Amino acid sequence: MSPTSHPPPRWRLDEVASAGRENLDAAHVARYDDKQDADAAGDVELLRRFGLDERSVVVDLGAGTGQFTLAVASVCAAVVAVDVSPVMISRLRANVAAAGANNVRVVEAGFLDYDHQGAAADIVYSRWALHHLPDLWKAVALARMRQILRPGGVLRLSDIAFSFDPADTETHLERWCATLPDVGAADAWARRDIEEHVRDEYSTFTWLLEPMIERCGFRIEHTDTSADGVFADYVARAE
């Protein structure tokens, strides 16, 4: 905090505290790339169809260890990789340096306090990060993403978002939990990880998330929801 800045209001969400236990754990972060493949190359190819090219400025919000950041850096002009976890930021900086990605700028910040500098972004990307915010703050974050983007710019949003009927919640969540063993290997997810996510984090229903996206100044152009009703992917255009 600079000498002239003011502390955040006491009602503001503490995004570091809300980042998730594992994302603040150095041992988990060290294993993250072995546990989770973000299919970054697939997202790069998808975004090419929506205008990603060598002139694009990309902002990766909730960049984690930088899987997407590094995949997209080789095909665009500049990437700003943003994460709120100090532990993730440390690994992200190391991965960017090891890759020699000179067009990447790493910023330690959250959805609610990232201060975008320079030209408006052409693409904002966020994968499996928005669920760390309750719905009030999801909407605020989406509105801030719209401010980052130029008109016509693209938001690529992927998250755990539920498309099943609320009356079927118990059935679907138990079925999802049952897809993983009670105890997994160190480099794999386990049932308890899903249980912790459902209990302690803020994944919402798609029929709540989609109106938020649209209310915040986007037009949804592509939607893909998983057959189990657990995951949702969007491409939305800034209006």
Image: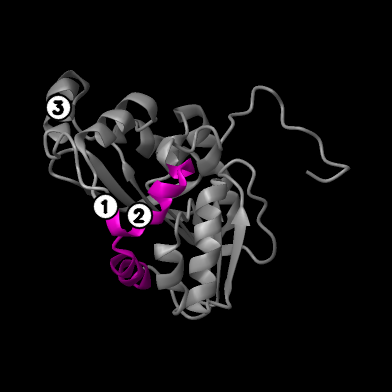
Callouts 3 and 1 close, C-beta under 8 Å? no
Whether pointer 2 and pointer 3 mark residues with C-beta atoms closer than 8 Å, the reply is no
Please name the predominant secondary structure of the magenta segment in the image. helix
Residue range highlighted in magenta: 23-49
- Tell me, for residue 31, which label it has, or none: 2
Residue at image location 48% in from the left, 35% down from the top: 138
In the rendered structure, are the residues bearing label 1 and label 2 in contact, judged by CB atoms less than 8 Å apart? yes
Residue at horizontal 59 percent and vertical 55 percent from the top = 148
Residue position marked by numbered label 1 in the rendering: 187
* Residue 45 colored in magenta in the image: yes
Disc 2 versus disc 3: nearer the observer: 2
Disc on res. 174: 3
What residue type is disc 1 on? Asp
Q: Is residue 59 at least partly visible in the picture?
A: no
Viewed as shown, does residue 187 lie left or right of 218? left
Residue 231: percent from left, percent from top? 25, 43
In the image, 223 versus 188, the foreground residue is 188
